[in-house]
């Protein structure tokens, strides 16, 4: 049975998301900030511009919307969006959070 166009689109989005996520998490774990947009200040946004991180958030939002229609969440995508939504003064820095994310995926960085 052939997949519907929406299923094909979802598959392509998830493939791109995964291919960007792991290298981005590794880069963040090595000290780059901006993956999770933890610092929500205009000055920080200018200083922490990261095209791949912006693309990841866009992909995650689209995947989440399509998956909601199917009733099947993508756990990796949901986790990434939760990390992007977390805020607080006592929150560990992005590199520490990226290391924890990688570890939960069973990936050594």
Image (spheres, rainbow, N blue to C red):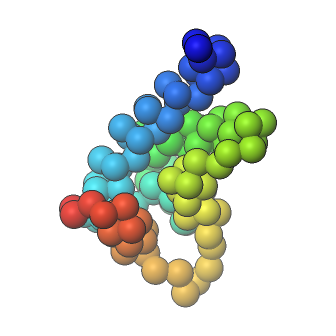
Q: Which x, y percent locates residue 43?
A: 54, 58
- Determine whether, in the image, residue 90 is placed left or right of residue 29: right
Quadrant containing the C terminus in the rendered view? bottom left
Judge whether 38 appears above or below 60 on screen: below
* Residue at x 41%, y 41% (from the top left corner): 18
- Work out which residue is located at the far bottom of the displayed protein and give it: 90
Q: Residue 37, can we see it?
A: no
- Determine whether, in the image, residue 51 is placed left or right of residue 78: left
Residue toward you, 67 or 49: 67
Corner quadrant of residue 75? bottom right
Q: Which x, y percent locates residue 51?
A: 44, 38
Residue toward you, 96 or 72: 72
Q: Residue 15, can we see it?
A: yes
Give the total of numbered labels.
0
Q: Which x, y percent locates residue 28?
A: 34, 59
Residue toward you, 101 or 27: 101
* Residue at x 59%, y 14% (from the top left corner): 1
* Residue at x 44%, y 32% (from the top left corner): 15
Judge whether 79 appears above or below 103 on screen: above
Residue toward you, 49 or 10: 10
- Work out which residue is located at the far left of the displayed protein and give it: 109
- Determine whether, in the image, residue 28 is placed left or right of residue 59: left
Judge whether 77 appears above or below 20 on screen: below
- Determine whether, in the image, residue 55 is placed left or right of residue 62: left
- Work out which residue is located at the far front of the displayed protein and give it: 1
* Residue at x 68%, y 45% (from the top left corner): 72
- Work out which residue is located at the far right of the displayed protein and give it: 69
Q: Which x, y percent locates residue 73?
A: 65, 49
């Amino acid at each position: 049975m052939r997949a519907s166009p929406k299923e094909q689109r979802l598959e392509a989005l998830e493939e791109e998301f995964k291919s960007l996520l792991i290298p981005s998490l590794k880069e963040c774990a090595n000290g780059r900030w901006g993956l999770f947009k933890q610092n929500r200040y205009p000055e920080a946004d200018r200083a922490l511009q990261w095209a791949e991180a912006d693309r990841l958030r866009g992909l995650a939002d689209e995947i989440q919307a399509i998956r909601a229609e199917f009733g099947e969440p993508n756990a990796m995508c949901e986790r990434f969006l939760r990390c992007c939504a977390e805020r607080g003064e006592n929150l560990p820095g992005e590199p520490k959070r990226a290391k924890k994310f990688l570890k939960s995926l069973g990936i050594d960085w």
